[in-house]
Amino acid sequence: MFDDFVRKIKLVATDPVLRNRVLFVLGALVIFRLLAAIPTPGVNIGALQSFLSNNQFFGLLNVFSGGGFSNLSIVMLGVGPYITSSIIMQLMTVLSPKLKTLYQEEGDAGRARFMMYSRYLAVPMAFMQSFAFLLLLQQNGIVAQLDGIHLMASIFVIAAGSMMLMWIGELITEFGVGNGVSLIIFAGIVSIIPSALSQAIFSFDVTLLPSYIAFAAAAVAITAGVVFISEAERPIPVTYARRVRGMRVMGGVSTYLPLRVNQAGVIPIIFALSILLFPQMIATFVSRSPIEWLASGANATIAFLNNQVVYGVMYFLLVFIFTYFYTAITFEPNQIAKNLQKNGAFIPGVRPGQTTAEYLGNIITRITLVGALFLGFIAVVPIILQGATGITTLTIGGTALLIAVSVVLDLVKKIDAQTSIREY
């Protein structure tokens, strides 16, 4: 296996096309990191760090922006608006039959148009999120109060930074290797590791050595679990009917239909965080209200949501529910059964048509249970480890770990496919 790895690395280094693709990715990521280091003026760093440490959602947003939110850089939103618009567009396929047909039945051209609509929607989303975050940061004393002109200028700069990241991600997808947006998020996760390790080293306590060992063992076990669940699939045997056309015999081959255990990926976690963020943002705005009973109710809501046990339970349940919800949107048993029937394929022992659709629906419901429980566990891993080890400076970001492992696996597959093509 090691010899095969070395051979592929040599092929990447010697093949000019593949080498240029890899270098393009590295150059684009360097530009992204430079943009993430340009801060906006007038930021109270101490208040910002305290705000991020007490808010799970903004901690995740900091990961998505590649650490840009930790210093309020010009790309503080990262690719968040684009991710949000993509989620909204996928949800709209439930309400709009035309969008559903465009996304599921018109092939690559239809998906390209669908992604174009997602990019268009990302522009107003970037402006809305910029405005909302600036108001929230001003209320918490993190950013100085801005007048109308300076507020509009800041909104335009932050929205433009997000759109530039989206453009860089599209360029990586077209001229590089792998998915550009995923690689940008991955670069953000990796960029936070050195500061987290240095903080853990400076705050090292010998009395907590067993906790550190247990933490390291948990990290290895969770990483292995993420790889296992990300790659796990249920193969459904499929047989193509034998057909005779003139002197040729076609079909008669057997293959399988892979159903992934985790069909939804990391999207349910993002859904759940968005739902949990909404009441927190509303309560934060209302807590400054001059009406006493309204402000006290908002403060009680904030205190209730900041309770780690309550937050963890709600987070787990929302992730579990949204895993089933998103799987139901993206996986269409009726469409798969129809495509199998059109191509003269069938599942042995199952009648084609509606019976096949029901059979696939039952299987995906059962295996999604494993994926939903796994995603819910990954989401609350930081809370569990903080309570079990007492270490607050070093925690496994379950969402970040899931994204990082998924991106690495996808990138390895893409590079392996490129090297295999050139070898043959």
Image (cartoon, rainbow, N blue to C red):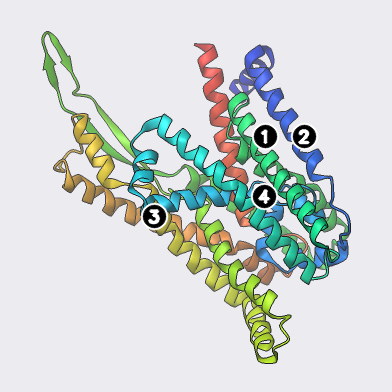
Tell me what residue is drawn at x 18 percent, y 29 percent: 344
| Residues at circles 4 and 1 in contact by the CB criterion of under 8 Å | no
> Cα distance, mark 3 to mark 2?
39 Å
| Residues at circles 1 and 3 in contact by the CB criterion of under 8 Å | no
The x, y position of residue 49, in whole percent, is 81, 63
Residue that numbered label 2 is attached to: 31
> Cα distance, mark 4 to mark 1?
14 Å
Residue that numbered label 1 is attached to: 168
The x, y position of residue 343, in whole percent, is 22, 29
Residue that numbered label 4 is attached to: 64
Mark carried by residue 179? none
Q: Residue furthest front?
A: 149
Q: Is residue 229 above or below residue 388?
A: above
Quadrant for the N terminus in the image: top right
The answer to which of marks 4 and 1 sits earlier in the sequence is: 4
The x, y position of residue 201, in whole percent, is 85, 56
> Cα distance, mark 2 to mark 4?
16 Å
Disc 3 residue type (three-letter): Thr
Q: SS class of the residue under badge 3? A: helix
* Nearest the eye: 240 or 127: 127
* Nearest the eye: 245 or 96: 96
Query: In this image, 52 relative to 109: left or right?
Result: right
Disc 2 residue type (three-letter): Ile
> Cα distance, mark 2 to mark 1?
9 Å
Tell me what residue is drawn at x 82 percent, y 54 percent: 71
The x, y position of residue 41, in whole percent, is 88, 54
Residue that numbered label 3 is attached to: 368
| Residues at circles 2 and 4 in contact by the CB criterion of under 8 Å | no
Q: Is residue 149 above or below residue 118?
A: below
Q: SS class of the residue under badge 1? A: helix
